[in-house]
């Protein structure tokens, strides 16, 4: 793809204001709960109160004439939501596998009456021994939830001779790392509206993936997919939480709409949303790394287990990203890797910004922080010795041919913060009262686009039309959910055709009107779909006899086309021929390209209360090209604070299947008082196949925050930590149960 | 798709009985006095710019002005507003603030944005030149999950500067 001359760019690289800002600033943007229809009913879900049980009977109370109740028996087709597997029922039928699993639905005109009726529904259960957490799942002494062994998916590979390398290396660093749940806490809770439409059903709601919903609920509704029309409403944040879960909710409202013949709207309140929508996978990683005399990494042995909850959802692909991220940004000759996602009787976990990578990077980057301490070298130098550089091969043997910005990012944050000097200074602190300072570092990548064969399977398609009277119309299935997609892709179109931004349009995602350009996930939209739009625009130029670099598209089009005539171009994504991935052997090019990042977190730790204040966060991200720098900064700042929440504050635990924090009063997310000064640094090493060199940025800002944060606390306190969220309570407990101070 | 329809709320020029003024207009609500102010605004008046994020006063997405003071409209009952004046995002004259939010990029998903605008408006009314700490204190009741608040703080500073010039 053309690498445009920087000085000639009019829209790309410019901090253009969001195209959706005006509606949002005035309260005019219509989210799904702002929509209503004549005769519309409300929907309500009756959920399991048991962690694991057989359903013996379901008894509705006498229902008023205008209220309808449905159970699994009312599902016209097959009782599952289709994703990779078919194990998630639309409504639980014979068994329930987690507290909050949907069992029955009510629709009626008055929500308060529905809630009263829901309380009167009698469900008789017979308890089954439940599997509470990933350790219990691995023990395997209870009836499995999934398959024969409770394992949703496993990956394993051996590279080189790790056993020998460990045996002959002078330094081995070991640790078992744990990460907790995280709730997305998008400000807009999940919601959907459905109504009978033509001979099928139309669904409007808050979502990332309109075509996932269409495909997911066609089997239970027993409808051909094209008779299910799915349209995205303005979406109030998602972060992965609206990738797979909305299919379940859409299935519920669609079922009620078809049963009642009326529009049905279902909006979760915050309690219901936290209780029963997907979360970030809790993890346990057993990790060993070895170094030679020159402090070069010689071997890696890693065993990752993710808690997938009661149904498989997206766990297999989340796990793939964990496994691919586990080796970090370093060169390895010897690896022994095992990764498993297991079933438990807990709310299903699913997609969340970073998608398995944050858990893996927490482990490897903490290992590097601990190794630096024990080897008596600073964490920056240790990373520099072992860093992947252009021309090196990744753990899976992918040769990094271009756009490898990790060293630049590392140097940028270290130089900006005077990291090395502060690191050693803070190590000398010995005060036992007041505050101590700390500084922590992490380096990481995020593979752009789907993992492995994902892009090949989805075959993303984008179409653009040009009408002289209207301008460019971009037809894609990707959604604006706050990240800025609608602005960025219009900038790409405007730049490619040299037409004003106002003359570009994106058709609101509606499965009846746009081709399937794939879901809005995996940091893929700008790079993959933006790339297709760019190519489509070049096709339009060719159609009217223009060279790719020629500028006056609108003028030539006006001459060659009648005012009511239009031209159109369609492109399908093809994985570059030199990108080859072997899923079975876990060898080859796992992603077309990677974005790279490094972050430094600076803290003050109060020694009486162990309260940690982040004083500064410096984040450098090499993303190929920032199509819109102000939006990229927004991703970096927002992702960084979300990462700090994950690392320090967002405590979500389950006791016997019951989540203990189910409101925003007890599940705490960072407020404006918790935010430090965040300094984003944007670095650009253009990717030859990205639009104007762009790669992905949506997820990477989150990925490495936790180890940098925990590393900073360690630097302040002179001890090692292995678990997040690292709350003051956990710091206290560790310091007062381990008498040995490592310093 | 339609927006939330306005179900013929009675309008009159003088307050009698349970009446309240919303965005400069007097209304006699059909909704019961025990209705949350949030639901009255959204469902009866169709003023959907006021959002429900948590329903328990934690997130600030439902902020409105009640006689010029910020309140979480999910925690206020309609009956408590008798004879009083409510201002929502739809009725707020805050162009300078709104423009600052747009210009600095303080908006992402937009769901918390009306609440943040209301809180900023109330802050600048009582303190036209807030420092960073005062901004953080004033907006501590507004959760935003997208922006990391950096550009929100900047937007308030820019708006304050503009106000100062105006």
Image (spheres, rainbow, N blue to C red):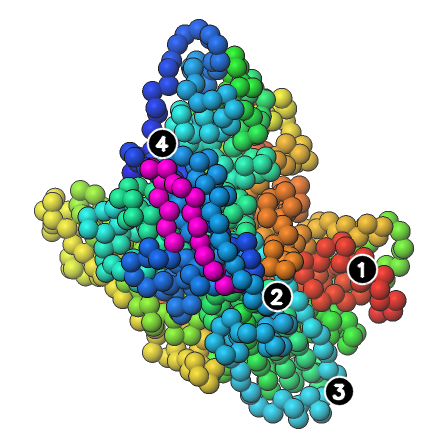
Question: Would you place residue B89 above or below residue A642 in this image?
Answer: above
The residues colored magenta run A53-71
Q: Are marks 2 and 3 on the same chain?
A: yes
Question: Would you place residue A433 above or below residue B90 in this image?
Answer: below
Position of residue A49 measured from the top left corner of the image (x, y, whole percent): 55, 54
Q: Residue at x 45, y 26 (%)?
A: B41
Q: Is residue A356 left or right of residue A367?
A: left
Dot 1 alpha-carbon crowd within 10 angstroms: few under 14, some 14 to 19, many 20 or more = few
Q: Nearest to the eye among marks 1 and 2: give it.
A: 2
Q: Secondary structure at mark 3?
A: loop
Dot 3 alpha-carbon crowd within 10 angstroms: few under 14, some 14 to 19, many 20 or more = few
Q: Nearer the viewer, residue A465 or A23?
A: A23
In this figure, which residue is indicated by the disc labeled 4? B4
Position of residue A266 measured from the top left corner of the image (x, y, whole percent): 40, 44
Q: Chain of mark 3?
A: A
Q: Chain of mark 1?
A: A
Q: Are marks 3 and 4 on the same chain?
A: no
Q: Chain of mark 4?
A: B
Q: Nearer the viewer, residue A97 or A116?
A: A116
Question: Would you place residue A171 above or below residue A720 in this image?
Answer: below
Question: Would you place residue A164 above or below residue B136 in this image?
Answer: below
Query: Would you say residue A79 is visible in this rendering?
Result: yes
In this figure, which residue is indicated by the disc labeled 2? A132
Q: Secondary structure at mark 4?
A: loop
Q: Quadrant of residue B123?
A: top right
Q: Are marks 4 and 1 on the same chain?
A: no
Q: Nearest to the eye among marks 3 and 4: give it.
A: 4
B45 in magenta: no
Q: CA distance from mark 1 to mark 2?
A: 24 Å
Q: Chain of mark 2?
A: A
Position of residue A313 measured from the top left corner of the image (x, y, whole percent): 45, 65
In this figure, which residue is indicated by the disc labeled 3? A170
């Amino acid at each position: 793809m053309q690498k445009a001359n920087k000085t000639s760019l009019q829209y790309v690289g410019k901090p253009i204001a969001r195209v959706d800002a005006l509606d949002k600033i005035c309260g005019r943007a219509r989210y799904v709960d702002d929509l209503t229809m004549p005769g519309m009913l409300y929907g309500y879900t009756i959920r399991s109160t048991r962690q694991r049980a057989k359903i013996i009977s379901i008894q509705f109370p006498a229902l008023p004439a205008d209220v309808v109740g449905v159970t699994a028996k009312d599902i016209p087709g097959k009782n599952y939501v289709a994703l990779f597997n078919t194990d998630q029922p639309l409504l639980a039928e014979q068994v329930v596998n987690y507290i909050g699993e949907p069992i029955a639905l009510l629709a009626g005109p008055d929500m308060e009456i529905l809630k009263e009726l829901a309380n009167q529904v009698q469900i008789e259960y017979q308890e089954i021994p439940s599997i509470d957490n990933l350790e219990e799942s691995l023990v395997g002494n209870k009836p499995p939830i999934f398959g024969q062994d409770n394992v949703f998916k496993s990956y394993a590979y051996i590279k080189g001779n790790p056993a020998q390398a460990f045996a002959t290396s002078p330094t081995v660093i070991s640790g078992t790392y744990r990460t907790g749940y995280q709730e997305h806490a998008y400000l807009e809770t999940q919601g959907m509206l459905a109504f009978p439409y033509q001979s099928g059903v139309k669904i409007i709601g808050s979502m990332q993936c309109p075509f996932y919903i269409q495909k997911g609920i066609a089997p239970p509704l027993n409808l051909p997919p094209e008779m299910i029309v799915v349209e995205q409403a303005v979406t109030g944040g998602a972060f992965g939480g609206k990738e797979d879960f909305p299919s379940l909710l859409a299935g519920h409202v669609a079922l009620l709409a078809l049963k009642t013949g009326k529009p049905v709207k279902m909006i979760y309140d915050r309690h219901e949303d936290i209780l029963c929508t997907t979360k970030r996978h809790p993890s346990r990683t057993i990790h060993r790394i070895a170094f030679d005399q020159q402090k070069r990494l010689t071997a890696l042995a890693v065993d990752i287990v993710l808690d997938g909850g009661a149904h498989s959802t997206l766990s297999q692909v989340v796990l793939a990203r964990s496994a691919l991220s586990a080796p970090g940004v370093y060169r390895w000759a010897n690896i022994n890797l095992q990764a498993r996602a297991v079933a438990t009787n807990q709310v299903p976990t699913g997609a969340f910004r970073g998608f398995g990578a944050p858990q893996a990077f927490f482990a490897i980057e903490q290992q590097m922080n601990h190794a630096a301490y024990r080897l008596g070298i600073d964490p920056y130098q240790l990373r520099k010795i072992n860093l992947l550089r252009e021309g090196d091969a990744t753990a899976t043997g992918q040769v990094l041919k271009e756009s490898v910005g990790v060293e630049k990012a590392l140097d940028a944050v270290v130089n900006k913060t005077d990291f090395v000097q502060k690191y050693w200074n803070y190590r000398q602190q010995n005060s036992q009262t007041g505050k101590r300072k700390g500084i922590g570092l992490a380096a990481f990548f995020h593979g752009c686009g789907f993992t492995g064969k994902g892009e090949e399977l989805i075959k993303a398609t984008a179409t653009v039309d040009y009408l002289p009277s209207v301008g460019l119309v971009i037809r894609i299935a990707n959604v604006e959910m706050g990240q800025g997609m609608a602005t960025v892709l219009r900038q790409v179109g405007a730049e490619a055709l040299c037409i004003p931004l106002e003359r570009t349009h994106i058709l609101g995602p509606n499965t009846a009107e746009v081709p399937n350009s794939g879901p809005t996930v995996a940091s893929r939209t700008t790079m993959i779909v933006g790339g297709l739009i760019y190519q489509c625009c070049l096709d339009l130029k060719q159609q009217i006899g223009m060279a790719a670099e020629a500028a006056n598209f609108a003028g030539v089009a006006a001459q060659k086309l009648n005012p009511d005539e239009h031209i159109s171009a369609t492109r399908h994504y093809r994985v570059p021929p030199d990108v080859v991935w072997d899923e079975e052997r876990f060898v080859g090019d796992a992603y077309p390209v990677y974005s790279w990042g490094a972050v430094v977190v600076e803290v003050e730790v109060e020694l009486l209360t162990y309260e940690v204040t982040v004083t500064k966060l410096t984040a450098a991200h090499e993303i190929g090209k920032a199509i819109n720098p102000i939006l990229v900064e927004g991703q970096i700042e927002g992702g960084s604070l979300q990462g700090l929440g994950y690392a320090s504050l967002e405590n979500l635990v389950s006791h016997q299947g019951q989540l203990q924090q189910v409101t925003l009063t007890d599940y705490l997310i960072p407020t404006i008082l918790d935010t430090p000064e965040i300094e984003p640094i944007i670095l650009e090493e253009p990717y030859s196949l990205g639009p104007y060199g762009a790669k992905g940025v949506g997820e990477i800002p989150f990925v490495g925050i936790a180890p940098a944060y925990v590393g900073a606390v360690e630097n302040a306190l002179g001890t090692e930590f292995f678990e997040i969220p690292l709350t003051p309570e956990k710091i206290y407990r560790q310091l007062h149960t381990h008498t040995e101070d490592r310093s | 798709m339609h927006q939330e329809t306005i179900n013929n709320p009675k309008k009159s020029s003088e307050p009698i009985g349970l009446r309240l003024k919303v965005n400069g207009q007097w209304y006699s609500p059909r909704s019961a006095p025990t209705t949350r102010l949030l639901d009255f605004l959204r469902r009866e008046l169709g003023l959907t710019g006021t959002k429900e994020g948590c329903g328990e006063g934690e997130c600030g997405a439902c902020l409105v002005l009640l006689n010029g003071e910020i309140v979480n409209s999910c925690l206020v009952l309609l009956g408590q507003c008798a004879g009083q004046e409510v201002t929502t995002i739809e009725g707020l004259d805050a162009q300078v603030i709104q423009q600052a939010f747009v210009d600095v990029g303080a908006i992402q998903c937009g769901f918390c944005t009306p609440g943040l605008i209301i809180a900023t408006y109330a802050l600048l009314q009582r303190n036209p030149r807030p420092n960073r700490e005062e901004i953080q204190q004033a907006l501590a009741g507004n959760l935003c999950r997208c922006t990391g608040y950096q550009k929100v703080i900047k937007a308030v500073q820019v708006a304050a500067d503009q106000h100062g010039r105006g």
